[in-house]
Amino acid sequence: MTPINTLTSTAAPLPLPNIDTDQIIPKQFLKRTGYGDFLFYDWRYNFDAAGHTTPNPDFVLNKPEYAHAEILLAERNFGCGSSREHAAWALNQFGFRAVIAPTFADIFYSNAGKNGIILCRLTDAEVETLIQRSTANPQHQITINLEQQTVTDDQGFQAHFDIDPFRKHCLLNGLDDIGLTLLHKDKLDAYEAKHNEEFWLAPKAQATA
Amino acid sequence: MSTESNPSQALKPRTMFEKVWQQHVVVEPAGEPTILYIDLQLVHEVTSPQAFEGLRLANRPLRNPARHIATVDHNVPTTSVADRLVIADQVASAQVNALRKNCAEFGIELFDVEDAEQGIVHMIGPELGATKPGMTIVCGDSHTSTHGAFGALAFGIGTSEVEHVMATQTLPQDKPKTFRINVEGGVNGELPYGVTAKDIILDIIGRIGTDGASGHVVEYAGSAIRALSMEGRMTVCNMSIEAGARAGMIAPDDTTFAYLKGRRFSPAYEKDPVGTVSAIPNYPDSFNPPPISRSPWDLAVEQWSALVTDLGATFDRELTIDATKLAPNVTWGTSPGMVTTIDSAVPSLADAKTDADRKSFERAFEYMDLKPGTPIKDIKIDAVFLGSCTNGRIEDLRAAASIVDGYHVAKTVRALVVPGSQAVKHQAEAEGLDLVFKSAGFEWREPGCSMCLGMNPDILSPGERCASTSNRNFEGRQGRGGRTHLLSPAMAAAAAITGHFTDVRYWKFNSKEGR
């Protein structure tokens, strides 16, 4: 994971609540590798009767003025539904480094963190302000400072976001979770040796009883 | 770690979640999430390839293969055995083959496409007896919450976390909050006629919203929950994620133990006594009863029985629902929270509580091609899907079969039954349910996830409207442009016969055998 601290970018507004991971990356693309081209597939493309696709000119990510946005703005409960980490991979591969929304679904929140995507929870009113500004002016620049836990913009906007200190530490330093857990290998070995005797919690109890 | 060694903590009343959590704490590093031991990871073909690849790249072994079980479910065709043995979709085929290769390389037991134990990953855990009360269970699939029906702490994870569990058999986890939902039924917890577990959970999601339980583990309690079969409990816990919950749990009881007893991976109950009650010294033999041998099963039941929430334990949130007021539910929109009863109508914009809801309503009306105020019973359907990890169990198929018996599917409707597992399929065939469905014009399929998410060839065409027993009615979930209405198996069966949503409470049964 690449360490990340500050990010300044334009932002693409997607002002909808409950954007689910089926929308972020539809199921037919979970069988392959390379996901960025299929981000928001059903919204990004128009389909003719024969199933041929053409970019939907009305969809925000197809508008040239938002093409380089690294921040996505959305409403509450972003990333709900399926646990597919492909949603985080698709956002990342498309070029998004951060999502700002009032709330995120739990599993997506975790998946995004593992992939170095910053998620900022701001209030409904704060998100609304940013959405309005980015909609009115695609050049609207937002800055996220992870160390300071702030979101600011080029028009005097200032907001603070909460983030778990450990998650922040991992993002700032690009740390590998597995490596961190394995620092506790001795304790894990001791725990597991004892826990394995508790056959009523073993998946294959008959094999161990 | 062990609370038994700390008297002050042992005396404090604890929730079931708290007990399971505490028993699985490996270490609580200062300023970091708790490292939680994972008893079982279930693996399927779609969310595991990158995790196995990650192990290889980092040259890490899979720590505990005995705590992993794999199957193929998301991608496999359900049309015929032949179609499953040679999968036409090259990409799907490659993913299934990759799982076979990975399981062989890392020593994981795989229940492959034609094994008698194959099925949707959340079906086979319980069927094998691998799912047990008190366990921690994860899987790269959000419907892992299903296993909570047994009093396990079970939740869906992303692929990075799948790799984490493979490498360490643990997960760093922040402790969730707790939320008890009491569902109180009538006498002995009875539900109103025609109301099922599916209607309970759809009602809850409609009430609290699709993010209503975010950050919480829900414990479902109350007389209506206790009266449910394990199948019904699994349906309720399965859709916990649709309310945003981290997990759903139900306290283990005699219903749970009766389900688990004698299953392949359940503790043995006849042989291998592991302890005896010793005779009381200095008393005559005639006073002492003969030594009682206690099987692993007896010991396990004793452990599991202690998991229930203590009297006086507190939850971060609590909600009580009067189940005697429930009616069969049908979703009308593109989120499981957009739900109403069969005897009502598509809501109007005025029913939206917030601006955001209003926007979602407008979008849903358009996507679903529905006008506000349309009676639910007037909505015509093109397809019916009976199956999924939500409602693909034997009890679900029995309920649906009893409705369709003696009738035929409406001319304009395509209907399919996809049993959730081989075990369910075989059981249903032994009971003759397959014949009931087939003679009524349903397709009878091989087990898998199928049209619940449409990763295999079973999908809706744009504009097609489906009555589905699955769990998500998101835009495009069952195929791009497809319109999904969620409901119970009996309600789906009734809609298949009449061609529109129909109130099962007034259903005229037509079975010649008195099914």
Image (cartoon, helix red, strand yellow):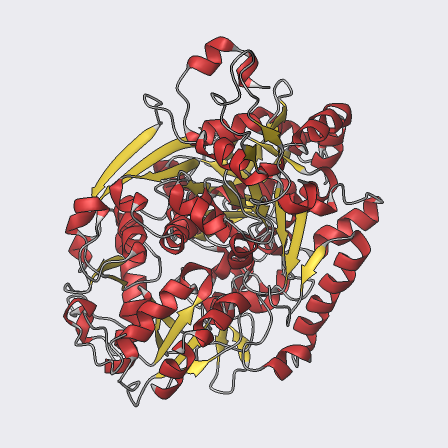
Identity of the residue furthest to the top in this view: B8
Identity of the residue furthest to the bottom in this view: B411
The x, y position of residue B307, in whole percent, is 45, 31
Left-right relation of B140 to A60: right
* Residue A41 in view of the camera: yes
- Which residue is at 35% across, 57% downward? B335
Left-right relation of A123 to B355: right
Looking at the figure, which quarter contains the C terminus of chain B?
bottom left
**Is residue A29 depicted above or below B189 in this figure?**
below
Tell me where residue B415 sits by quadrant: bottom left
Residue nearest the viewer, comparing B113 with A12: B113
Tell how many labels: 0
Identity of the residue furthest to the right in this view: B59
Left-right relation of B396 to B152: left
Residue nearest the viewer, comparing B9 with B174: B9
Looking at the figure, which quarter contains the N terminus of chain B?
top right
**Is residue B254 depicted above or below B425 in this figure?**
above
- Which residue is at 20% across, 69% downward? B504
The x, y position of residue B134, in whole percent, is 51, 36
The x, y position of residue A108, in whole percent, is 53, 46
* Residue A150 in view of the camera: no
**Is residue B508 depicted above or below B319 in this figure?**
below
- Which residue is at 49% across, 78% downward? B445
Left-right relation of B413 to B23: left
The x, y position of residue B143, in whole percent, is 48, 53
- Which residue is at 44% across, 68% downward? B476
